[in-house]
Amino acid sequence: MWKHQDNELRKSIQDINWDDLLLYLGRNNRELLHRVDFEKQSVVKAIRIDKELLLIEVSYIQNELVIAFPQLSTISDLVINSATAYVEVWFDLSRDLRPFYTLAEDDTTLAGVVSAYKGLRIVGVEDLFEALCWSIMGQQISLHVAYALKQKLVTTYGESIEYKEEKYWLFPSPERIATLQVEDLRSLSFTQRKAEYVMGVAGIIATKQLTKEQFVGLSLTEMEARLTAIRGIGKWSANYVIMRCFRHPDAFPIADVGLHNALKKVHNESQKPTLEEIERWSENWAGWRAYATFYLWRTLQE
């Protein structure tokens, strides 16, 4: 239950690893969709509420998650309900992680990792278009290059709000991108194929051929089939989107290079594991393979 106190919203939560969440959110200095302040131990993000852009600042103080509103002197019920709903989804707060901890205790791969980062929660991407675009941009390139592409796309076609001489950006809308030509994205260093894929996704979302509501009640297999039917979305991208946007705890981007590097590191091997080895190890993670992946990714930031 969120409490409204001194123009802030507070919720008591014990099982959250705020330090590691901030580390994940602040992992690349090209990130424009939120800004981490490590001194204040907070993250500031622009969100849309009732067609207006609004800043929220989220911190964790004395076992309470706190949402502040830097621009506002008073907050309406609409702002309260919208902001709390957004943060609940962003940090997967409704998820009881105790079954995951129990599973990890007896697992050779996960025991030490989960013990070290206990309370880490999968950081969500609420917007389906953003999640699909990010999965396309990240295909077969380094994370650093993917962030450079995202930075160009956001600053060229996204919306922003200014506060204290700083700009806070929102990801471009599918409606905006659908009006472009492939050449417009090529000029931002997108490959021909990736430009076509992003344009295609923008078109089907802008025309409501693809909506988040269509996925309600679907199984993981059905979600994957629905997404991989989209041009440019393979199994890796589909599972990434299911993990980050649809919040399915068993989504598993098994072909992910970062996952392979993390497993190599955790097992102290000289070579990356084979897909067959990963399949075998992950059998014990059933129901929680998305969380296993997210925790393993965290080891790469050490």
Image (spheres, rainbow, N blue to C red):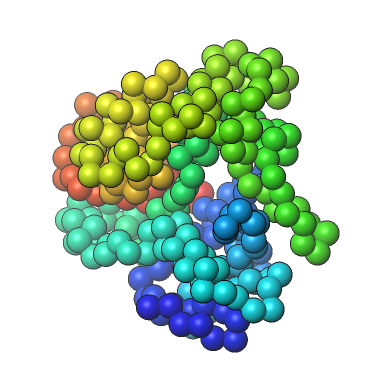
- The spot of residue 182 in percent (x, y) is 63, 16
Residue at the spot 48% in from the left edge and 79% down from the top edge: 10
* Location of residue 239 by image quarter: top left
- The spot of residue 130 in percent (x, y) is 52, 39
**Drawn side of residue 292 relative to residue 88, left or right:** left
Residue at the spot 34% in from the left edge and 21% down from the top edge: 229
Is residue 80 or residue 35 the one in the foreground? Answer: 80
- The spot of residue 191 in percent (x, y) is 61, 16
- Is residue 259 in view from this perspective? no
- The spot of residue 104 in percent (x, y) is 23, 56
Residue at the spot 35% in from the left edge and 28% down from the top edge: 227
**Residue that protrudes farthest toward the right in the picture:** 165
- Is residue 232 in view from this perspective? yes
Residue at the spot 64% in from the left edge and 25% down from the top edge: 179
Count of numbered badges drawn on the protein: 0
Above or below — where is 253 with respect to 16? above
**Residue that protrudes farthest toward the bottom in the picture:** 6
Above or below — where is 212 with respect to 107? above
Q: Quadrant of the N terminus?
A: bottom left
Is residue 120 or residue 179 the one in the foreground? Answer: 179
Above or below — where is 254 with respect to 45? above
* Location of residue 251 by image quarter: top left
